Image: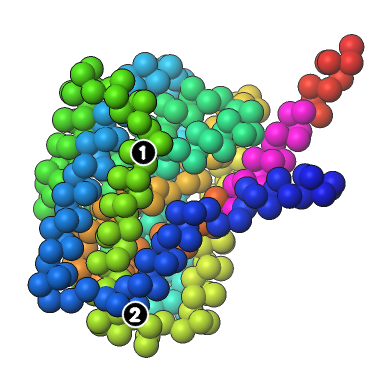
Amino acid sequence: MSSTASASLLSKIKPDNFTLALLVTVALASFLPCTGQTAVVFGNITTVAIGALFFLHGAKLSKEAVMAGVLHWRLHLLVLASTFVLFPLIGLAMRPLALTFLTPELYMGILFLCALPSTVQSSIAMTAMARGNVPAAICSASASNFIGIFIAPILVGLLVAKGAESKSSLDAVLSIVMQLLLPFLAGQFLRRWIGRWVDRHKAVLKYVDQGSILLVVYTAFSEAVGEGLWHTLSVETLIALALVNILLLALVLVISTWASRRLGFSKEDEITIVFCGSKKSLASGVPMAKVLFSTRSLGMVILPLMLFHQIQLMICAVIAQRYARRTDAAEAPARIS
């Protein structure tokens, strides 16, 4: 690999600014946690920020983009099956291994991770980088996020042990509808009037997305630190959590790749299935965790998701580069002839 290619690959897998901001937020919560009335104020601000986040998601989602790939139903079904069926099954199958090295609370976080929808931005970006079916990726990732608003709380109710501090499936769905879905639908309804303004200011509005996540992370880890998070979580446990996340992602990548080839999808569709079906959304997951779980357990629940988020970006960036090189190699003879 040339030095230029190595530098390009390194730029893809190194932590981005948002990941660094997450690390700084966790450090801030560890040394300067919010408590008492300050924690109540931060909690109220976070609730408002999450509503704004999903309102903007609704306003940004173009109906035309969704319809561009909606007819490719076999691909979308496979992506949804990978996201909401394969992930939970693997998470349950990993229980004996995970509980050997992880605390029950961290394993609960793994199961919560498995119930979440796919990402939107990074799934589409990786698909485009790898020369896949981008319109289908837009449709699949968007559908996964919308459907996940209903499916995720139900899956959490089914996957998480009854003794865990989570709400019942019905209460969870109602909470999700009130705090996440209604702002999302309001954004969709108002898109005809504010859509152009939102599209013009995407670079600025991303800070609402990231800011709301950082607020949730700060309040969650502040509470967790008060409960003795870093006294119960060792370096060995963090390494074990990273390895469990890597194993989970590797199994999903291998199985989704095999299934897409077995079912006769084109290479472009395979790329879309692999990237849309293997991702889990930090942007949707952190707000959902705040709605679904008690504050006391929130820090442990979102820690596996935060770690998985960076692992999926790093590994999928490498895979996208490999897909892109294979596409370039296949196109070279055609250009020569």
Q: Secondary structure at mark 2?
A: helix
Residue 270 visible in the snapshot: no
Q: 53 or 113, which is in the foreground?
A: 53
- Residue 184 vertical position relative to residue 109 in the rendered view, above or below: above
Q: 107 or 204, which is in the foreground?
A: 204
Question: Magenta segment, which residues?
Answer: 314-328
Q: Earlier in the sequence, mark 1 or mark 2?
A: 2
**In the displayed structure, does residue 233 sit left or right of residue 269?**
left
Residue at position x 61%, y 56% in the image? 14
Where is the C terminus found, in terms of image quarters? Answer: top right
Quarter of the image for residue 104 reads bottom left
Residue at position x 45%, y 38% in the image? 121
Q: 252 or 14, which is in the foreground?
A: 14
Q: Which residue is mark 1?
A: 204
Residue 205 location (% of width, % of height): 33, 38
Residue at position x 69%, y 41% in the image? 321
Quarter of the image for residue 140 reads top left
Magenta stretch containing residue 294, yes or no? no
Residue 39 visible in the snapshot: yes
Q: Which residue is mark 2?
A: 31
Residue 162 location (% of width, % of height): 21, 68
Residue 324 location (% of width, % of height): 70, 34
Tell me which secondary structure the magenta stretch mostly adopts.
helix
Q: Secondary structure at mark 1?
A: helix
Quarter of the image for residue 184 reads top left
Q: 325 or 18, which is in the foreground?
A: 18
Cα–Cα gap, marks 1 and 2:
30 Å
